[in-house]
Amino acid sequence: MGFADAAMGPASFLSEFYTSFWWVPAGVLAAALAIKLPTIVRLWKDPLLRAVGGLLLLACAVFVFVAPSTIVWVNRVTGVPNISAPWVYSLLTAFCASCLLLIIAWRDGLSEHSPSTRRATRWVVSAYGGVIVLLWVLFALADVPVERTRDLDTYYANTPFMRELILLYLLAHTTAVLITARLIWNWIRTGGFDAWLRWGLKFLGVGYALNLAFDAAKLTAVAARWAGGDLDRLSLDVAPAAACLSAVSIAVGFILPHAGQYLYERRRIRRAHRRLRPLYRLMRSVHGSGVPFVLRASPELRLTRRETFIRDVLLPLARRTDERLRERSYAAALGLGCAPERARALAAAVVILDAVDAGRTDDGYGGNGPDTTELLREIGAVSRALRHPDVIREVRARAVAPGDTAAVTE
């Protein structure tokens, strides 16, 4: 049909491959929609998310209904030969409109009620809605009695009204894709995006560039028929390959920022959980037990429970820390060449270990009213400092003998 037509030749391996391959981009696009759907539903008022959802849904529908088996089924159910043509082309035109609406939402953000946004949206909906209506009118006027599941564009390239229908959908598609691709590549050059979004935009840019390759192949094949030539293989092999690769690239472009950020957050949470292990073990030795294991606990919940446990045990312990020892430890760490932030963490580790030892011997310091805010807030830095017991011992030794101020490189 419009995307992949023509009678199977005896050596048409590529055509057969692309016929079965239509379900691959449909599946990838459906996966992209499934990943984005919870966010779209939760933030339905966001015009950008609505545009993304509409684009992915329409793109998936195009590849489902363009598959030759689906084309045959639709023709049989309706009893109208080739009625799949205006139906698929209508879906493709609606996809074009969704691309432009996405660009409008992307450009204007949440200002969907601004006059310029409303005008642009109305123009897109009116123009492409008119194209869809005209597609059906032209199909009703055309005489297309012979069912063509794979080569409709070139087979009917010279048929009155069908010729105009084919040219109309290709020009509408080319216009929308050209505008979208140009703006995406302009945004990529401006920068200001995080790495995941930048790569997502690059995949989107490649996807829309491949859509232009699809249009070029189709228009060249149709024009060749008008001139009495035969370049049908461009429509049969090149255009389907470009369309399938484009769909996969566009799906990856939408999936990558979401999946990449998700994986990054999971990695960050697990690393934060792992970095708290030294301080957690120390607090567990004070408390006598740790956080109960929960099989179905999420990484976020495990991290939160570990942080809560550490702070709960650390709070009464921190009230017994010696503020003078912390000041001397901080000066000693600076004397060892540590940066101020690391020196504070080492000083905190020293006084916490000192308080733990004092608690075990029932010999508290008391009386200085230490500020526990910093200790409770910087538990990650303190835990990292506990990974270097040799440095802590050196800082503690210098803090006990503050007159020793010789600088030593860590």
Image (tube, rainbow, N blue to C red):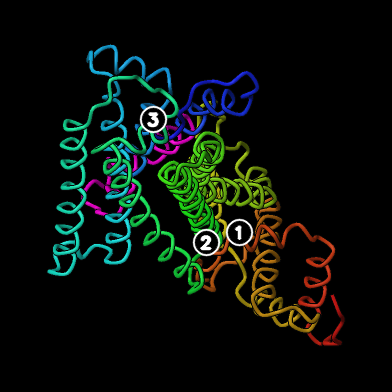
Is 282 on the left or on the right of 262, as rendered? Answer: right
Provide residue 275's location: percent of width, then percent of height: 66, 52
Question: Contact, CB < 8 Å: mark 2 with mark 1?
Answer: no
Which of marks 3 and 1 precedes in the sequence? 3
Q: Which residue is mark 1?
A: 380
Residue 70, x across and y down, in percent: 37, 19
Residue mark closest to the camera, 1 vs 3? 3
Q: Is residue 67 visible?
A: yes
Identify residue for label 3.
152
Sooner in the amino-acid sequence: mark 2 or mark 1: 2
Q: Nearer the viewer, residue 410 or 321?
A: 410
Q: In the rendered image, which quarter is residue 245 located in?
A: top right
Instruction: Decide whether residue 51 is among the magenta residues.
Output: yes
* Residue 268, image x, y percentages: 58, 52
Residue that mark 2 sits on: 198
| Distance between mark 2 and mark 3 Cα atoms | 39 Å
Asked if 261 appears above or below 399 in the picture, the reply is above
- Assign the N terminus to one quadrant of the image: top left
Name the chief secondary structure element in magenta: helix
Residue stretch in magenta: 27-53
